[in-house]
Amino acid sequence: HGYGNSFEDAARTALRIGHGVGAAGALALYSWPSAGSAPAYMADRNNAYWAVRSLKEFLADITGSRWIDLVSVVVHSMGNEVFIRAYSELAAECTGGAMTAPELRKVRNIVLAAPDVDREIFLDQYAARMTSLGARVTLYSSRTDMALMASASVQGGDYERLGKNVVCIPGLMVADASDVKTDVLGHSWISDSRA
């Protein structure tokens, strides 16, 4: 989930998405410790960084379970900061021989929705790792996302967000959600719009 979301908000969103896509399997939610408050943006960004290690452990546990065959992941907004780092670190460890999460290949589908992540850092440090284990990665981006525009501004203005403008990224499927009708910020379409 993104910043400013309480556990309850994230749980409701997960249920809406699961129902909306007709998920047939079990639905799991990883909720990082967001302050659940719009003014707490920078505190949430710090909490997102601290949550990476715990998400790595969760991913290793869930993919290591013999009861789970395949995993699809949907991540929204600042939650992408947590997931991209955690997954990329695990992927690097697996391909580097450490085998921290040998079953990470069970993650077959990854949806990066409106990622509030620095685009250049993603392209330079994480894009190749995200696809290194064969997962199908889809990036949903929007030119009309006012929340990501505000995020770039808060961080100095020169740090384009990955989910703000549609770009071609080798190995990733990229979808333009600019025309999807949603909240006034154009940011929450992943849970608010049937389209």
Image (cartoon, helix red, strand yellow):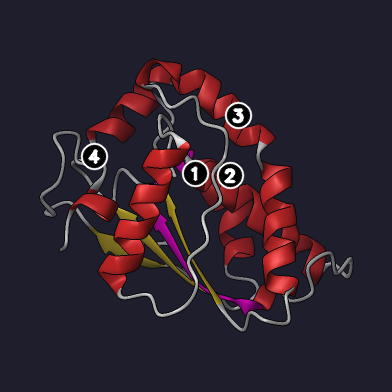
For the residues labelled 4 and 2, the Cα–Cα distance comes to 20 Å
Per the image, the residue denoted by label 4 is: 145
The disc, 4 or 3, on the residue closer to the chain's N-terminal end is 3
Give me the C-alpha separation between circle 2 and circle 3. Answer: 9 Å
Residue in the image at 45% along x and 18% along y: 40
Q: Secondary structure at mark 3?
A: helix
Q: Residue furthest right?
A: 98
Residue 6, image quadrant: top left
Residue 14 position, x and y percent, is 39, 55
For mark 1, give the secondary structure. helix
Measured in 3D between alpha carbons, the distance from the residue under mark 4 to the one under mark 1, in whole angstroms, is 16 Å
Residue wearing tag 1 = 79
Q: Are marks 4 and 2 in contact (CB under 8 Å)?
A: no
Give the residue type at disc 2.
Val
Q: CA distance from mark 1 to mark 3?
A: 10 Å
Q: Residue at x 53, y 51 (%)?
A: 123
**Which residue has dot 3 on it?**
47
- Three-letter code for the amino acid on which mark 3 is drawn: Asn
Q: Pointer 2: what residue?
A: 82
- Asked if one can make out residue 77 in the rendered structure from this viewpoint, the answer is no
Front residue of 24/145: it is 24
